[in-house]
Amino acid sequence: MGKTRSAPDIWIIIPTLLLLTIGVIMVYSASAVLAFHDFGDSLYYLKRQLLFAVLGVIAMFFTMNVDYLVWKKYARIALLVCFGMLVIVLIPGIGVVRGGARSWLGIGAFGIQPSEFMKIGMILFLSKMLSEQQAKITLFTKGLMPPLGIMGLAFGLIMLQPDLGTGVVLVGASLLIIYTSGARLLHLSYLGMIGIAGFVGLVIAAPYRLQRITAFLDPWQDPLGAGYQSIQSLYAIGPGGLVGLGLGMSRQKYSYLPEPQTDFIFSIIAEELGFIGGTLVLLLFTILVWRGMRAAITAPDTFASLIAVGIIGMIAVQVIINIGVVIGMFPVTGITLPLISAGGSSLTLMLTSIGILLNISRYSR
């Protein structure tokens, strides 16, 4: 029996476009001072955000109308290309260093992040692999280890940049796909303990990560060093109160809060729009995740269901970690807020991924 195609889920489209609109407005509000100081143009980040938002929306409506089964055909090739880019970006002279990580390919102000491509490439490949070999997933060696090995290789290449935040998102989305496909919880628990031990090793191996953990536990131990970002973020959120200081009235964006237009944009939202504005953003993300999971549950086949789980997992993990960092629950990791933070590769690929999710919603049972 052929699939019946209907209209895409409007309750995925509405929160996506609303979050994108809030993002464009808040990127301008958070970055105008910094942009004028650095580039002599207060609209610098706004123009870039609008460009990538338009490109992303075009990509979203394109993938929304491409049958999701097409991605099954090209999933292996896409993953190999993503691995190739992760290797190339590590080559000195080719990979561009920004923010202490060699994670960019490009020229001048424009560039792409291979790790962002890897997130969606991994989701597509694991969904194909596990939908075709679902009967084996309960077997530790033949079923669970192959997808974990591929995920671990991608994580290792990303950590060589290093980019712990993106690596954590990749692992989180991948594990959700693997668990949803039927992996035994006992096997994942054992591997989880090994993963925690490995994470501790990564933290110990790099002193700056240990400083971030220490700063997260008590940022006032080093208020001008490792704890600076966390403290300034809380200084932004506190005065916001219920309704905020007003759009454009942030004080922390005047060179107090680092990266106000990217990693800490939620701090500016809370400062300018208050508890109400922050809650609205969280509500929109909640609706998006709820409808995405609904699309996964009602998807016409296992491949579509696993893709939907992976995309929604990617969004949910990023939101939880980003806002957790902003409010002082997690150590600083450098993860942007989906659809809202300033970004090129991240914004465009996020909208492209949501387009795939929308296409799956068109075939809901």
Image: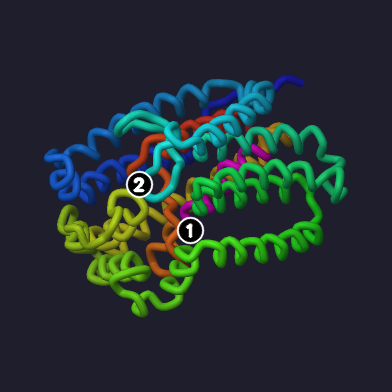
Closest to the observer, 160 or 35: 160
Above or below residue 68? Residue 35 is below
Place of residue 166 in the rendered image (x, y in percent of width and height, measured from the top left)? 51, 48
What is the magenta range? 306-320
- Residue 38 inside the magenta-drawn segment: no
- In the displayed structure image, the side of residue 152 where residue 92 appears, left or right: left
Residue visible at 72% across and 20% down in the picture: 2
Give the amino acid at mark 1.
Answer: Ile
Q: Which residue is mark 2?
A: 341
Place of residue 340 in the rendered image (x, y in percent of width and height, measured from the top left)? 36, 46
Residue visible at 31% across and 74% down in the picture: 223
**Mark 2 and mark 1: Cα distance apart in space:** 14 Å
Q: Under tag 2, what secondary structure?
A: loop
- Residue 313 inside the magenta-drawn segment: yes
First in sequence, mark 2 or 1: give its number.
Answer: 1
Residue visible at 49% across and 68% down in the picture: 210
Residue visible at 56% across and 40% down in the picture: 119
Mark 1 burial class by Cα count in 10 Å: few <14, some 14-19, many 20+: many
Q: Which residue is mark 1?
A: 321
- In the displayed structure image, the side of residue 240 where residue 296 appears, left or right: right
Give the amino acid at mark 2.
Answer: Ser
Closest to the observer, 357 or 225: 225
